[in-house]
Structure formats: C-alpha cells, structure tokens
Amino acid sequence: MKHVKITAIRKVEHTDLMARYERPITHACSVCEGQTWISLDGKCPAGLCPEAWKSMREFVTTLAQGGGNFYDGWMQNPHSAMISCNDGFRPVSFLIETIEE
C-alpha cells in the first residue's frame, strides 16, 4: 500500500454562525494550518482528529490502494484530494496525497 500524507491547508472560523447557533465549548479544534500526518496502510494516523478522519477515510483508503482520479479529474494531481472536516463552525481543509514510500 502507498503512504498518504494529510496536510491541514486552511482552518476557518465562522464566528457569526458560532455566535448564533453554537453552545459555548471549552475545547475546540486543535488542528493548525500546516500540520501534517502520514497514513500507513490506509489507517488513521495518531493525533488526527477522529471526526476529520471520518470525512476523509474513504479517500485515504482509495489513495493507499493506488486509486485516485476522483470525480473524473477534479484535482490537478489525480493521486490527491482536498477534503474538509465536518465541523460547520470551524472547518479545516485537508490536502491528502500519496507520497513515495
């Protein structure tokens, strides 16, 4: 299987939505832009947010197995994908891409 690099590219906070709909929480997302993880054998890397993993798991697994070209050429690099986590208040966009082992 191929190794898959996961990079946090952008993190956004929708403060207007947070103020309107979110109940205040003590711990929010701790992911930082530029942070990276390596998925081995298509598995969730240690330290990656479990909820973010749910959003990207199928893409990572496909890339690890040598697949790609999602949505008929959506990405410039066919062995990559740009996936966002499912936090509607503080979404993080992740670039996932196969790397040389």
Image (spheres, grey):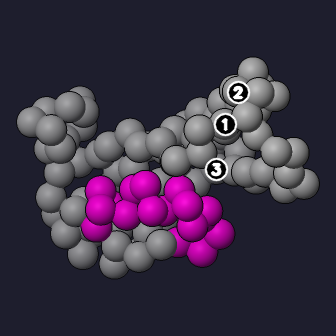
Magenta stretch secondary structure, dominant:
helix
On the image, the x and y values in percent for residue 98 come to 31, 56
Give the amino acid at mark 1. Answer: Phe
Q: Quadrant of residue 61?
A: bottom left
Q: Is residue 29 left or right of residue 3?
A: right
| Side (left or right) of 84 relative to 16 | left
The quadrant where residue 57 appears:
bottom left
Q: Earlier in the sequence, mark 2 or mark 1?
A: 2
Q: Nearer the viewer, residue 25 or 72?
A: 25
Q: Position of residue 10 (x, y in %)?
A: 59, 33
Residue type highlighted by circle 2 = Leu
Tell me how far mark 3 sits from mark 2, CA to CA.
25 Å
Decide: marks 3, 2 in contact (CB < 8 A)? no
Whether residue 34 is situated above or below residue 64 in the rendered picture: above
Q: Nearer the viewer, residue 72 or 54?
A: 54
Residue wearing tag 1: 89
> Circle 2 sits on which residue?
17
Q: Quadrant of the C terminus?
A: bottom left
Q: CA distance from mark 1 to mark 3?
A: 20 Å
Q: Are marks 2 and 1 in contact (CB under 8 Å)?
A: yes
Picture coordinates of residue 58, whole percent (x, y): 30, 62
Q: Residue 39, can we see it?
A: yes
Identify the secondary structure beneath mark 3: loop
Residue at position x 51%, y 39% in the image: 93
The crowd level at tag 3 (other Cα within 10 Å; few <14, some 14-19, many 20+) is: few
Identify residue for label 3: 35
Q: Who's the residue at 15% across and 58% down the image? A: 67
